[in-house]
Image: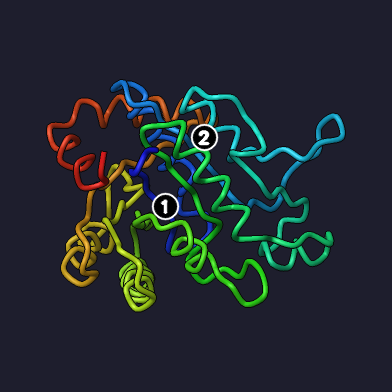
Amino acid sequence: MALHGIFVTGTDTGVGKTIVAATLARLLRMNGVRVGVMKPVTSGCREENGKLLSDDALLLCQAAGIPYSEDVVPYRLRDPLAPAEAAKTEGVRIDFSHIKEVYQRLAASYDYVIVEGAGGLMVPLSGGLLIADLAREIGLPLLVVARPGLGTINHTVLTCFAAQQMGLDVAGVIVNGMPDNPGPAEKSAPHHIGSLCGAPVLGIWPQRNEADEMEIVDELAAWLDGQAETSIVLRELGV
């Protein structure tokens, strides 16, 4: 059974968790790692041929080169709401033991498993349980995805502090979407995050504006593969 993986969370919705998770999956695949992916709970799914599909999970699968399956995304919810609210509306009970069982099945089949959460750590899932509780149940360290710019220091420090208070190991932080010409807030944020979070900044990823998400993933993975420090980053992530 594979013992290695990471749980990707974010400081907020829309910081690029899926792009980061998919890029890491693509990078590992490029380097010969059999990588599995999982998006345990996703809301805002679209319907196709009578089935709900998660575009985030589809991107993760495409990046990892594995088939899309219910194990990748056990809970698919239609409404674009917080998962607990969407599940309540649709009469779905989110069962942590089922998610853990599915994760363990994936971990037995792959060298490394990337699990992407929904929103941030404090997003409610079921019966007062949060994304943070799910990460603890699965037992993986966290990779926190943060945005650059004003406010990100506060959001990132709070996320890492909350994780540590809940007994979660934070492997590191990725600052995602740094513009080509960053202002003073963007330039200074990674240093402050690294000094205050109690976890290393494992990357400052450039902003990409291509319309096709898989194109962004491919370009970022190729860029990372050419960086000398990438091997150190992967080692920090337990690869």
> Can residue 151 be seen in this snapshot?
no
Q: Position of residue 137 (x, y in %)?
A: 48, 62
Q: Depth check: 157 or 98 in front?
A: 98
Q: Position of residue 141 (x, y in %)?
A: 34, 56
- Name which residue type carries label 2: Leu
Above or below — where is 149 with respect to 3? below
Q: Disc count in the image?
A: 2
Residue carrying label 2: 60
Image quadrant in which you'd find residue 126:
bottom right
As helix, strand or loop, the secondary structure at mark 1 comes to strand
- In the picture, measured across the screen, residue 3 lies left or right of residue 124, that is left
Say whether marks 1 and 2 touch (CB < 8 Å).
no
Q: Nearer the viewer, mark 1 or mark 2?
A: 1
Above or below — where is 133 with respect to 97? below
Q: CA distance from mark 1 to mark 2?
A: 13 Å
Residue carrying label 1: 7
Q: Position of residue 33 (x, y in %)?
A: 33, 26
Residue, x 27% and y 64% (percent of image)? 185
Image quadrant in which you'd find residue 81:
bottom right
As helix, strand or loop, the secondary structure at mark 2 comes to helix
Q: Quadrant where the N terminus lies?
A: top left
- In the picture, measured across the screen, residue 89 lies left or right of residue 164, that is right
